Image: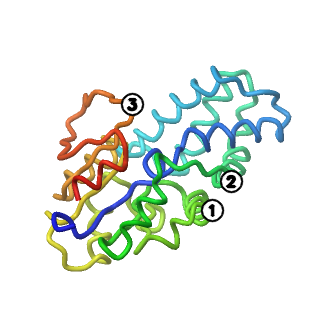
Amino acid sequence: MKQFEVILWDVDGTLLDFLAAEKAAINSLFLEFGLGTCSNEMLRRYSKINRKYWNKLELGEMTKPQILVGRFKEFFTLEGIDPSLGEQFNAAYQVRLGDTIVFCDNSRELVTSLRGKIKQYVVSNGTIIAQTKKLKNSGFDQLMDGIFLSEQVGYEKPAKEFFDCVFREVGAVDRDKILIVGDSLTSDILGGNYAGIKTCWYNPDRLANDTSAKTDFEVQNLNDILKIL
């Protein structure tokens, strides 16, 4: 445990299976709102729209409230559903997201095993409502040394300002001793590049890196991080 002193963990798609939570939340809310069944094909269309909106947030082209509601309005319009339901649906969705906890690999055991050996922090662009519930239900809220959510920080990853806030709280640590682990090249890895820290891309699907983000490490299974540390 000598190479790094601090590890910054992304949550959605890294520690926790976001797609599983997304699917469960949307399926249950479709029934609750009387919208019928949300097929897997519809979910795939929504996920594509969702990713597009989050990219706009990361680029600073839209605000968090705009992307959260806008994605559902566009999705509902595409599916022939009243888009005016977007705001109400999103509000319920934020709460429902934390009800389904599926760990990526054995992330909880991994984080637990590292306690006391390395400082660990959550760094997430997810909403306070959704992430607070997820972290509580997963137990990560008790396992981490600190939690940084963009809505509280005031900046979104990959902005350097987000990480400046993190570093102020973490204290005097050499940037070369800090590692960020995440699945998003445009949020986690690029953010790490801007912040001048080491990056580890969690890439279980072995996707190609077609961005300008520079990865120092890449793993397909979170357990392989132990070899890096």
Residue at point 52%, 35% (across, down): 50
Where does the C terminus fall, quadrant-wise? bottom left
Q: Locate residue 93 relative to residue 20 in the image: left or right.
A: right
Q: Name the mark on residue 205.
A: 3
Residue 66: image location, x then y, percent: 54, 46
Q: Which residue is drawn at 60% across and 66% down?
A: 136
Which of the 4 image quadrants contains residue 186? Answer: top left
Determine which of the numbered discs, if any, sits on residue 137 in the image: 1
Query: Is 226 on the left-hand or right-hand side of 130?
Result: left
Q: Tell me residue 226's x, y (percent).
A: 28, 55
Q: Is the residue marked by circle 1 packed among few (<14), some (14-19), or many (20+) residues within 10 Å?
A: some
Distance between mark 1 and mark 2 Cα atoms:
8 Å
Tell me whether the residue at label 1 lies in contact with that at label 2, contact meaning CB atoms closer than 8 angstroms.
Answer: yes
Write the residue at 56% across / 66% down. 139
Q: Earlier in the sequence, mark 1 or mark 2?
A: 2
Cβ–Cβ under 8 Å for marks 1 and 3: no
- Label ID, residue 99: 2
State which quadrant residue 134 falls in: bottom right
